[in-house]
């Protein structure tokens, strides 16, 4: 709104609507009606209150009273920690294979066993990094678009 009309006063525009809403919701007649309906339900509440208190005391004495807190974000914590731990282990393996391949290349020996170790280290490190990258895109929940990757590689 500010980009279209920089001089506009939003509060001046909203003030009549807010006044109308407040006048309707908090008018004396509306408040009296709400208070009266609340007072009419009070005797039923007072009749049921001693029985409910007695039931709660009985449940707490017999051990049947259970209190459970709902924490939806904390319920996902073990799964998140498991995924992060698995990723860290795979990353450590991929890093160690990459470093081992680098060390074997730096040694510079030209034996068949040495070439075999370099090939094995290269294949395992590349496959580990590929699995880790794929796992990242699968676990992120966002759709992976190959077109953006292809556009990046064409540059």
Image (tube, rainbow, N blue to C red):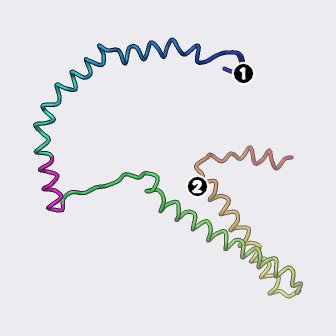
Disc 2 designates what residue?
139
Question: What is the distance, in whole Å, between disc 2 and disc 1 at their CAs?
Answer: 39 Å
In-image side of 147 versus 10 (left or right): right
Residue at the image position 67 percent from the left and 72 percent from the top: 92
Quarter of the image that includes the N terminus: top right
Residue 61 drawn in magenta: yes
Span shown in magenta: 53-63
For marks 2 and 1, the one nearer the N-term is 1
User: What residue appears at the point 55 percent right and 16 percent down from the top-left corner?
Assistant: 14
Left or right of 100 on screen, residue 109: right
Estimate the x, y position of residue 24 in percent, counting from the top left. 38, 14
- Residue that carries the numbered disc 1 in the rendered image: 3
The x, y position of residue 45, in whole percent, is: 16, 35
| Residue 111 drawn at (x, y percent) | 85, 88
Q: In the drawing, what numbered circle is on residue 125?
A: none
Q: Nearer the viewer, residue 125 or 38?
A: 38
Residue 89 occupies which quadrant of the picture? Answer: bottom right
In the rendered structure, the answer to whether residue 149 lies left or right of residue 12 reads: right
Tell me the residue at 47%/14% (across/down).
19
Disc 2 to disc 1: CB gap under 8 Å: no
Residue that protrudes farthest toward the front in the picture: 28
How would you classify the magenta stretch by its main secondary structure?
A: helix
10 Å crowding of disc 1: few (<14), some (14-19), many (20+): few
Neighbor class of circle 2 (other Cα within 10 Å; few <14, some 14-19, many 20+) is few
Instruction: Give the x, y percent position of residue 123.
Output: 74, 72
Frontmost residue, 60 versus 71: 60
Q: How many marks?
A: 2
- Per the image, label 1 sits on a secondary structure element best described as loop
Disc 2, SS: helix
């Amino acid at each position: 709104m500010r980009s279209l009309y920089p001089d506009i006063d939003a509060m001046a525009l909203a003030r009549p609507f807010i006044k109308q809403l407040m006048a309707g919701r908090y008018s004396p007649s509306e408040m009296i009606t709400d208070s009266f309906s609340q007072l009419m339900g009070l005797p039923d509440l007072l009749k049921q209150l001693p029985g409910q208190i007695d039931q709660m005391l009985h449940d707490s004495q017999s051990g049947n009273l259970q209190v459970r807190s709902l924490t939806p974000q904390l319920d996902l914590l073990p799964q998140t920690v498991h995924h992060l731990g698995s990723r860290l282990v795979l990353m450590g393996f991929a890093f160690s294979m990459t470093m081992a391949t680098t060390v074997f290349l730096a040694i510079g020996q030209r034996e068949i066993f040495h070439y075999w170790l370099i090939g094995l280290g290269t294949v395992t490190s590349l496959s580990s990094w590929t699995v880790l990258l794929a796992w990242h895109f699968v676990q992120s929940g966002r759709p992976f678009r190959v077109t953006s990757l292809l556009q990046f590689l064409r540059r």
